[in-house]
Image (cartoon, helix red, strand yellow):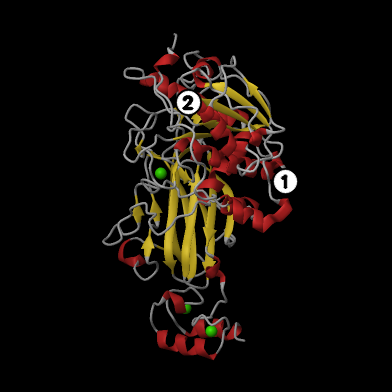
């Protein structure tokens, strides 16, 4: 079967100003100094729609590209100003987060999609990446094979997801520009990569279409600085390159290709900034208070790129999920882990917060598995739920509905999409206490691995018993506790048994001074 690549509709705007904010790179460099990753050793593929002249490749003479090798994978047809601006954001010296990237392979999408990705090629696999150092594939274009050809759109995205897992390459895929604009299936419908919008929210957003695989999934996955999606997308690609460099320079270098892509993705999504506007629209009153059936923000996805937070998660201690709540160790403020769970199994992470916690965020992602003939794929459904843990986690108390009114100001305690391959818990002003996050597997099938990332505001980890928040466990706290005595106030339930009682006075006295 032959595909007419010319039927693609393309392009995301022409060259213009770059980032309007820095995506966390200033904080990362300030924190790590000369040890901050630069993307060194990481290589990228840059797939571009040709300009009218046919030019698709960055200008190798651009001042930001000194010392870089840009290999043109199709016949040269001049320089593309669009590709040059994308390249500046993805790897440009003095501009990009990842100026250490020096090896770039440039593709014209019209030949790449059949010649390299091999859409329409039956069971022929996508070509191997031009180098095993390639870790990011940038797609600052959008497209579709057009009416009646949805099968090709699906096949293209399956092949992209297949290559991501096979070769350890994270696809970053732009959304359309313009608030309310039409989405395109390529390549933003990706399961295993990241679709990208803009911090100013001037991008297409919504559910993947009925003709897509597992339709109804929320897009974009992430927003980032940039005046067009063409230029916010490579900012995410550059951030990913920094994470991959860190992975490869650490004990995590033994991770498989699939694992490292999913780890980078969950760090990007789990570390994203969620401002006061961010919501996954769980009801905030009534019996379904806190139950989110759509996992992320409809416009902002998982949030706004923050590479510093993503990197902090990545370099925090790994803690994998535990099969029982009581068997789980306490997790730190930041971290990541995996959980391989089969049908009807659960996995758990346990948190103890001593102060009112401004923000508690827990994110999981997992990939789909595409069959090697591209005729099918495996999608599994997983869900997140958080409980209040009592009695050393022997009792898991539900937080949905009115039960959560005294425990958190707003947010969600369940993330239960039936179609997405991301779930997110986002809680504002969580009361002191112990909490257990439960990842559950819906439906049947063999074990599947999810990748989790969390960030809990450091304010959560003050002194146990410092009820008046003055930085010491002292006489004032005894006064506060006595006022709470006999109530169910979670702030005073220091021994986590569900009521403020004598045991809590003992805990306070143990921590006194
Ligand atoms: Ca789910
Ligand atoms: Ca105190
Ligand atoms: Ca108690």
Q: Position of residue 351 (x, y in %)?
A: 53, 63
Q: Nearer the viewer, residue 227 or 413?
A: 227
Residue name at image x 39 percent, y 34 percent: 176
**Residue pushed farthest top?**
1
Q: Is residue 68 visible?
A: yes
251 left or right of 280 in image: right
Please name the residue that numbered disc 2 is placed on: 158
Q: Residues within 10 Å of mark 2 (few under 14, many from 20)?
A: many
Q: From the image, which quarter does the C terminus lie in?
A: bottom right
Q: Is residue 80 above or below residue 445?
A: above
Q: Are marks 2 and 1 in contact (CB under 8 Å)?
A: no
Q: From the image, which quarter does the N terminus lie in?
A: top left
Q: Nearer the viewer, residue 3 or 165?
A: 3
324 left or right of 105 in image: left
Q: Position of residue 164 (x, y in %)?
A: 56, 31
Q: Earlier in the sequence, mark 2 or mark 1?
A: 2
Looking at the rendered structure, the secondary structure element under dot 2 is helix
Asked whether mark 1 lies closer than 8 Å to ligand 1, one says: no
Q: Is residue 148 above or below residue 309?
A: above
Which mark, by number, is residue 77?
A: none
Picture quadrant of residue 105:
top right
Q: Nearer the viewer, residue 32 or 376?
A: 32
The mark tally for this picture is 2
Residue name at image x 47 percent, y 62 percent: 359
Q: Is residue 250 above or below residue 508?
A: above
Q: Position of residue 50 (x, y in %)?
A: 49, 21
Please name the residue that numbered disc 1 is placed on: 250
Q: Residues within 10 Å of mark 1 (few under 14, many from 20)?
A: few
Asked whether mark 2 lies closer than 8 Å to ligand 1, one says: no
Q: Position of residue 127 (x, y in %)?
A: 60, 19
């Amino acid at each position: 079967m032959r595909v007419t690549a010319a039927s693609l509709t393309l392009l995301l705007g022409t060259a213009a100003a770059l980032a309007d904010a820095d995506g966390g790179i200033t904080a990362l460099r300030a924190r790590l100094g000369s040890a901050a990753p630069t993307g060194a050793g990481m290589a990228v593929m840059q797939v571009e729609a040709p300009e009218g002249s046919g030019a698709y490749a960055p200008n190798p003479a651009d001042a930001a590209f000194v010392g870089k090798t840009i290999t043109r994978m199709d016949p040269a047809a001049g320089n593309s100003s669009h590709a040059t601006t994308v390249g500046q954001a993805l790897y440009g010296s003095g501009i990009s987060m990842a100026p250490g990237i020096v090896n770039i392979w440039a593709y014209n999408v019209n030949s790449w999609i059949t010649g390299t990705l091999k859409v329409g090629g039956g069971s022929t696999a996508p070509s191997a990446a031009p180098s095993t150092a390639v870790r990011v594939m940038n797609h600052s274009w959008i497209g579709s094979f057009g009416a009646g050809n949805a099968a090709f759109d699906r096949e293209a995205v399956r092949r992209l997801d297949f290559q991501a897992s096979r070769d350890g390459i994270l696809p970053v895929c732009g959304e359309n520009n313009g608030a309310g604009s039409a989405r395109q299936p390529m390549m933003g419908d990706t399961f295993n990569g990241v679709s990208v919008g803009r911090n100013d929210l001037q991008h297409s957003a919504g559910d993947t279409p009925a003709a897509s695989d597992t339709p109804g999934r929320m897009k974009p996955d992430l927003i980032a600085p940039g005046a067009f999606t063409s230029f916010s997308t490579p900012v995410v690609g550059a951030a990913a390159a920094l994470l991959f460099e860190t992975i490869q320079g650490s004990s995590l270098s033994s991770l498989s290709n699939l694992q490292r892509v999913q780890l980078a993705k969950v760090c990007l999504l789990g570390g994203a900034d969620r401002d006061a506007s961010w919501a996954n629209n769980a009801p905030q009153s009534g019996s379904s208070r806190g139950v989110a059936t759509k996992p992320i923000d409809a416009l902002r996805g998982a949030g706004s790129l923050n590479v510093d937070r993503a990197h902090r998660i990545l370099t925090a201690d790994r803690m994998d999920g535990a099969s029982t709540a009581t068997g789980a160790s306490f997790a730190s403020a930041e971290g990541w882990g995996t959980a391989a769970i089969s049908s009807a199994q659960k996995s758990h992470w346990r948190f103890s917060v001593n102060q009112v916690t401004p923000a508690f965020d827990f994110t999981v992602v997992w990939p789909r598995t595409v069959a090697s003939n591209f005729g099918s794929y495996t999608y599994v459904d997983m869900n997140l739920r958080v409980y209040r843990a009592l009695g050393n986690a022997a009792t898991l108390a539900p937080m949905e509905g009115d039960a959560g009114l005294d425990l958190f100001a707003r947010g969600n305690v369940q993330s239960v999409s039936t179609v997405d391959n991301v779930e997110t818990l986002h809680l504002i002003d969580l009361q002191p206490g112990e909490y257990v996050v439960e990842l559950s597997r819906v439906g049947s099938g063999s074990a599947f691995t999810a990748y989790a990332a969390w960030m809990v505001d450091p304010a959560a980890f003050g002194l146990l018993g410092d009820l008046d928040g003055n930085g010491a466990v002292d006489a004032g706290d005894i006064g506060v506790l006595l006022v709470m005595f006999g109530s169910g106030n979670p702030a005073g339930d220091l021994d986590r048994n569900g009521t403020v009682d004598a045991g809590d006075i003992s805990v306070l006295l143990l921590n006194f001074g």
